[in-house]
Image (spheres, grey):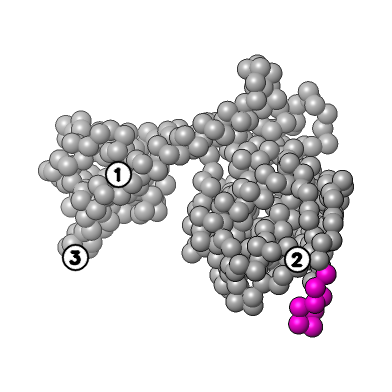
Amino acid sequence: MWLLPGTLWTPWSDPWIGSEREAAWIMVYSAEMKKAVGLLRSNLDREGLGLQDRRFTHHGVHRPDSDAPLILVACSGGRDSLALACVAHLVADMTGLRCGALLIDHGLVPDSDRIAERAAGTCRELGMDPVRVTRVKVPVTSAGPEADARAARYQALSEQALGLGARAVLLAHTRDDQAETVLIGLIRSQGLEAITGMARRVERRGMCYLRPFLDLDRKDTTAICRQQGIAWWDDPTNGDDQPAGSTLPETLPLRSRIRHDLLPALNRFAGRDMVRRLALGADMARLDQDYLDSQVDGLFQRLVACPDTDQKAEGVLACLDAHGLADCHPALRTRLLAQVLTRLGIRFTAVQVRALDDLVCRWHGQQGPRFPSSHTAIRKGQVILICNDGDHAHR
């Protein structure tokens, strides 16, 4: 059991239950721990993972049932994920859930196996079970090393979690991570998605992922680890060892440079906490995005059709109702066009989406945009065809 410095423990009963002795205690939590526990419990409640049995409302040591729902913490060994591991185990004790941890070793930093095993040891000391360490090989693609590592990580997490029958995987992203994600979006992309940040709940590869700490700051997770006496590992690419006011080299990841250089400068320039404002803005933008996406889903069913047999033979992948699309609001129409391309697995840019939109609303016989891997779009009358062989489709 981990004891918070300054925490008051008072035994008030010492009953015998069956063949086991139960010690009951009254604990006074720190403000950071109270907030973290409340956030996680509310997240789990929304997933139907609340109190499992009334006996867990009573003080004392209780063991979860062997068939109780399992939640897993994705743990990297950093302060955020180890704080979440500690809080998750505590909440599991309060509610009757089973709680374990998954650690993914990418092998991308020196001694990564030792770092992963040390973090796994901390999770086991907390009482988490099961605790799994998985070594993955990160493929090299045009997406870049960070995206490649993320894809490999999620694939491994989902495979492990599904194999264990888990109900949810908990991710330790904080408000600071959310603000950094918004700024990365503004730098790298356009549109509403650039400012929506990370979702609080997402389905990936058949597994539910929750981010209960998006309303906590990194200073909160740091405080929890210090109060609990938990040692964490700082990724050297984060640039945490560099003095404030210095500039990180461009060889370090963009996220690290945003954290170390850009956000402090924004705070100074605005004279306020821009992390909080960016994170709150992301919440508001995501509500708008969710609403627009729900409207697009209905339009997709009505305006996008699968090709018939002859069209398939000519390389047609999808048929779009140009007349119906022209009647849509531009915000819905462009999102629908982007969704069609995404579902077909076609990479695209904002410029190409605008060109595709021109086929809908400003068509005067011009050819449509060409996409990677010989994909193209053409208009024939009131139908726009998305094809995987544009030249053949013109025959």
Cα gap from disc 2 to disc 3, whole angstroms: 66 Å
* Circle 3/circle 1 CB separation < 8 Å: no
Type of the residue with mark 3: Thr
Residue 304 counted in the magenta span: no
Q: Residue 295 carries which label?
A: 1
Type of the residue with mark 1: Gln
Disc with the residue nearer the chain's start (2 vs 3): 2
Question: Is residue 87 shown left or right of residue 156?
Answer: right
Across and down, in percent, residue 377 comes to 27, 45
Check the image and report above or below for 163 versus 35.
Answer: below
Type of the residue with mark 2: Gly
Across and down, in percent, residue 367 comes to 24, 38
For the record, the magenta segment spans: 14-21
- In the structure shown, which secondary structural element does the residue marked by tag 1 occupy? helix
Residue with the most extreme left position: 381
Question: Is residue 132 shown left or right of residue 288?
Answer: right
Closer-to-camera residue (144/276)? 276
Q: Name the residue under label 3.
A: 309
Numbered disc total? 3
Quarter the N terminus occupies = bottom right
Disc with the residue nearer the chain's start (3 vs 1): 1
Q: Residue at x 87, y 46 (%)?
A: 6
Disc with the residue nearer the chain's start (1 vs 2): 2
Quadrant assignment, res 70: bottom right
Q: Which residue is drawn at 65% across and 62% down?
A: 57
* Circle 2/circle 3 CB separation < 8 Å: no
Across and down, in percent, residue 338 comes to 35, 43
Residue 165 appears in the picture as rendered: yes
Q: Mark 2 points at which residue?
A: 60
Q: Which residue is drawn at 84% across and 55% down?
A: 9
Cα gap from disc 3 to disc 1, whole angstroms: 30 Å
Closer-to-camera residue (109/38)? 38
